Amino acid sequence: MQDVITLALAKGRLAEQTFTLLENLGIDCSEPRQPGRQLVLWDRKNNLRFILVKPSDVPTYVDHGVADLGVVGKDTLLESGRPLYEVLDLTFGQCKLCVAGYAEASAPVTRATFRVATKYPRIARGFYDGKGQTIEIIELHGSVELGPVIGLSDVILDIVESGSTLRANGLSVLEEVCDVSARLVCNRVSLKTKRERIRGLIDGLAEQVRRMKEEQT
């Protein structure tokens, strides 16, 4: 199966937007758009295989070579710490990774250890290590905003899109960590062994992204 290219996609909006770009390149995405209970989908004419997985699993599949390429949010990519080639910013799924909390100096939580609630412990540790600040990480995976509200943490580190949930709970962005968008990543070995086909996909998607930007301006 040397000539088969396998693409790992996070289920949901990122996958749907990726399908649109691929279809513009003449790739048949009818199977992955309507997967049913199937986990492995095909465009057999172009020898392209799709696997639909959880977002956090995309870097794992690509790193282990089960998938040659993957589409994943920059936040998930950073948190994974996997040695992948980040070959293209697809520009959709844009938001920011931020530190948020109470803007007032007299925050409702005061303690010796600064607590950060997040589902991104690796990113949080790296961000605060870079500032020379010791923190305690409270790992949460849902309603992270509750951390400061109920006194579990001093701040949160999380994805912010509109900021409406923060404002509804009296919180605000205190610091921006990084910009986030969908990224195309590649297995290091695959880029060597299947270089011609993979470069063709990368170049084709890059052209689609360029056209998309032109249409938005």
Image: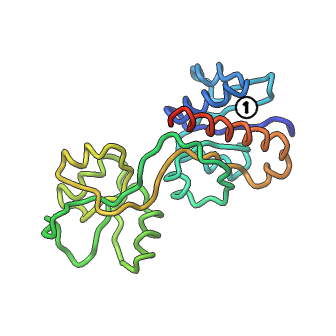
38 vs 15: above or below: above
Residue 52 location, x and y as percent?
A: 60, 34
Residue 10 location, x and y as percent?
A: 55, 38
Q: Is residue 48 found left or right of 40 in the rendered image?
A: right
Residue 217 location, x and y as percent?
A: 50, 37
151 vs 199: above or below: below
- Quadrant in the rendering for residue 114: bottom left
User: At 36% across and 45% down in the image, what residue appears?
Assistant: 161
Residue situated in front as seen by the camera: 173 or 144: 173
User: At 38% across and 60% down in the image, what residue appears?
Assistant: 176
Q: Is residue 44 found left or right of 57 in the rendered image?
A: right
Secondary structure type for disc 1: strand
- Quadrant where the N terminus sits is top right
Q: Please say which color scheme the image uses.
A: rainbow
**Callout 1 environment at 10 Å: few (<14), some (14 to 19), or many (20+)?**
some
User: At 81% across and 35% down in the image, what residue appears?
Assistant: 4
Residue farthest to the front, as pictured: 217
- The residue that mark 1 highlights is 49
Q: Amino acid at mark 1?
A: Arg
User: At 74% across and 41% down in the image, what residue appears?
Assistant: 203
The number of callouts visible is: 1
- Quadrant in the rendering for residue 66: top right
Residue 111 location, x and y as percent?
A: 20, 75
3 vs 174: above or below: above
